[in-house]
Image (cartoon, coloured by chain):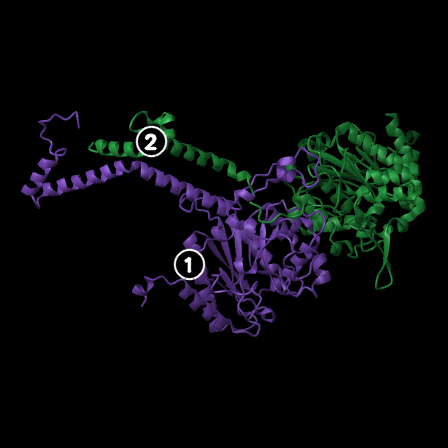
Chain colours: A green, B purple
Amino acid sequence: MAIKPRTKGKTYSSRSVGSQWFNRLGFKQNKYGTCKFLSIITAFVFILYFFSNRFYPISRSAGASYSPSHGLYINEIPASSRLIYPHVEHVPVLKQMTVRGLYITRLEVDGSKRLILKPEENALTDEEKKKTTDQILLVKHSFLDHGKLVYRKSNDAPEVVVVTLIDFENYELETIIQIVQNRVDYAQKHQYGVYIRWIQEFLPVLENQNLAESYEFIKPLVIRAAMHAFPTAKYIHFVDQDALLMNLDLSLQKYLLDPKIMDLALLKNVPVVANSNIKTYNHFEYSSAKIIIPHDADGNIDASSFVIANDFYGKALIDYLNDPLLRNFPWDNTGDKLSAAIGHILQWHPTLLGKTAIVIPKVLASQYDASLGQEGESGNGASNGDVYHYNEGDLAASFKGCRSRGTCASEIGHMYQKIKKS
Amino acid sequence: MSSVPYNSQLPISNHLEYDEDEKKSRGSKLGLKYKMIYWRKTLCSSLARWRKLILLISLALFLFIWISDSTISRNPSTTSFQGQNSNDNKLSNTGSSINSKRYVPPYSKRSRWSFWNQDPRIVIILAANEGGGVLRWKNEQEWAIEGISIENKKAYAKRHGYALTIKDLTTSKRYSHEYREGWQKVDILRQTFREFPNAEWFWWLDLDTMIMEPSKSLEEHIFDRLETLADRELKSFNPLNLRDDIPYVDYSEEMEFLITQDCGGFNLGSFLIKNSEWSKLLLDMWWDPVLYEQKHMVWEHREQDALEALYENEPWIRSRIGFLPLRTINAFPPGACSEYSGDSRYFYSEKDHDFVVNMAGCNFGRDCWGEMQYYTTLMEKLNRKWYTRFFFP
């Protein structure tokens, strides 16, 4: 009350001289002008403060920047299509070159020779490709650069990626084309990705570089590479080269990931591997299935066609399988080594078993039985409708054991014609 | 003032009357009242007179605190959010995991004063009673060390509102076979995870440790500056000469397991682990008979060596481990890592006010009781306030 006169005089004398511009702003119309101006600024600052708090969480104070994630090779190439498969037509040249011609060989201290992979190697640029006339060199580089392809488009990212290994040493060009075409046809139909690599690309990573002995443990290696190549994919569907996707209309989401169907396919309260005391869980949350893998007829894990989620559960299983300590353990030689290793992991680690759906083979890898095929009507390979053997309409037919029978090419060719017809 | 009639009897607004009144009734109740009113008025008037200045100063102060606070703890000038180029076909980006990721602090900023939430955010696990006198007598010095150590953690947990759980490490038959001897720590951790399902972080501490700076909270000491404090690669410090770059490691993942390295490799005497699905999976995968059967003769540090082997080869584990400098939560006395004496990375420094000292390996030819006494006295000396001597002369 008694304040007005005193302040009035002081402010006028000091302000009117020093800040002519301020009067022009129009705040100085009454004696509370400066106060009003300051209040507006204060209010503005407070509003700014509250809103800036909302935006802070996005900013991430990076203490140190780390190198981005990379695969086996450090320098990678963006893939233009979500169908990643090698140049199949190079098979005859690759056969000529053999694995020894593709890699550098190093003589170890103990006298053994090892193939070496160079992670820092750069891909051949287009210009270099044009300049090179040497066909052999081009094939070699296309082989080595294939592993550097990664898919990084986010607008057209596939949810499921079909992964397969192909082998130029033991298979003929015709069979390889059939295998690759089968995966591509299936993926095209459902907007899936395809990730196909040569088995021989992974030989240098292994300690035991004998392909026949280490074949099974290349599967987790290629799955890990596919997880890296398609980081936004939700599921990786591995299909062995000795298997064909027979029913191209069945999409994984509708056919298997649907809780109703998975409930029918799920094996509850059965031994994880034959004669084990550890059994699969009675109560299983279908939405949390991270690993979907079938049993074979003997009740063991069948690693010829299975689905793995591309999150840390899936990565944990795959990385564990890729651990040299696990890979080089003398597994029982009765079945295949990878099945034994997966069976072991699932029995010993309940957290992973709780995320694993062990299903009947019919939904992922029905066994194709050649003998049934020949006896049955017109050789369609159909059985009497049990869950282990291939019936018409099943997703995939597995020709497991065809290598020892020596009939892979004929069986694949025979069944491939069937898909073509339908 | 203008509304009050001139002939009003109200003495409040009239200075002259007030002075007379005061003279009349000096010492009386009324006089005191007038005095109070007078002082209040002068205060009000001076406040009002300087209101612009006060507003200006408080605004400046506020701005100063705001800006300095944000530069220290958040450092917005050096931010680089990685998910911006999600539509480009760029290789520097690892993909979806970071595209939609917002920065969340490694712990929730729940107020310490929220009484209605009884669950603690941080749980300290103290491993006590090592051996438990099963294989040999537990002497009185060991009892005393245990008492001091527990009291130290108890006071710290109480001060900052953390939970403390003391776990018994008695040698029991369950772990006595060489194949299983290291499983105890993992079993205890998994049991504690079930015991405190709503906790966010667990801090494991061995018994031979002493929190030297109880006034520092874990939030301000570790979590608020985790991104700058922790190192995720081995380039700068790699005592084991592990491969520093393996394929598929994704450092855009959150850190969920914070450990330290001493001169001999990983040290699990003091570490932090987040209560998460990943941690539970890690605790499950840590031990596998296939790995352990091949290596139990080599892995003399049991769970530490097993973790080193997993870290060496498995990117899913490497992606979420962060290394804190040893001295942040696990400083050594001169007796440990003694062959590296003089290396400032390992040893407790009184001058730098290191947080925790870990008398690691003091029962191997060193004097545990002597070290414990020394650091207890030092801790008391460092935390003595000027007023303490009035109460404890």
Which quarter of the rendered picture does the N terminus of chain A lie within?
Answer: top left
Residue B211 placement, left or right of B12: right
Q: Position of residue A287 (x, y in %)?
A: 64, 36
Q: Amino acid at mark 2?
A: Thr
Residue in front for this viewpoint, B21 or B113: B21
Q: Position of residue A194 (x, y in %)?
A: 78, 35
Which quarter of the rendered picture does the C terminus of chain A lie within?
Answer: top right
The reply to whether residue B47 is in sight is: yes
Q: Residue furthest left?
A: B24
> For residue A382, what is the image quadrant?
top right
Categorize mark 2 by other alpha carbons within 10 Å: few (<14), some (14-19), many (20+). Answer: some
The reply to whether residue A275 is in sight is: no
Pointer 2 residue: A34
User: Spatial distance from mark 2 to mark 1, Cα to Cα?
Assistant: 53 Å
Nearer to us of marks 2 and 1 is 2
Categorize mark 1 by other alpha carbons within 10 Å: few (<14), some (14-19), many (20+). Answer: some
Q: Position of residue B184 (x, y in %)?
A: 59, 60
**The disc numbered 1 marks a residue on which chain?**
B
The numbered mark at residue A63 is: none
Pointer 1 residue: B155
Q: Amino acid at mark 1?
A: Ala
**The disc numbered 2 marks a residue on which chain?**
A
Q: Position of residue B174 (x, y in %)?
A: 61, 62
Residue A342 placement, left or right of B141: right
Q: Which SS class for mark 2?
A: helix
Q: Which SS class for mark 1?
A: helix
> For residue A416, what is the image quadrant?
top right
State whether residue A109 is above or below residue A396.
below
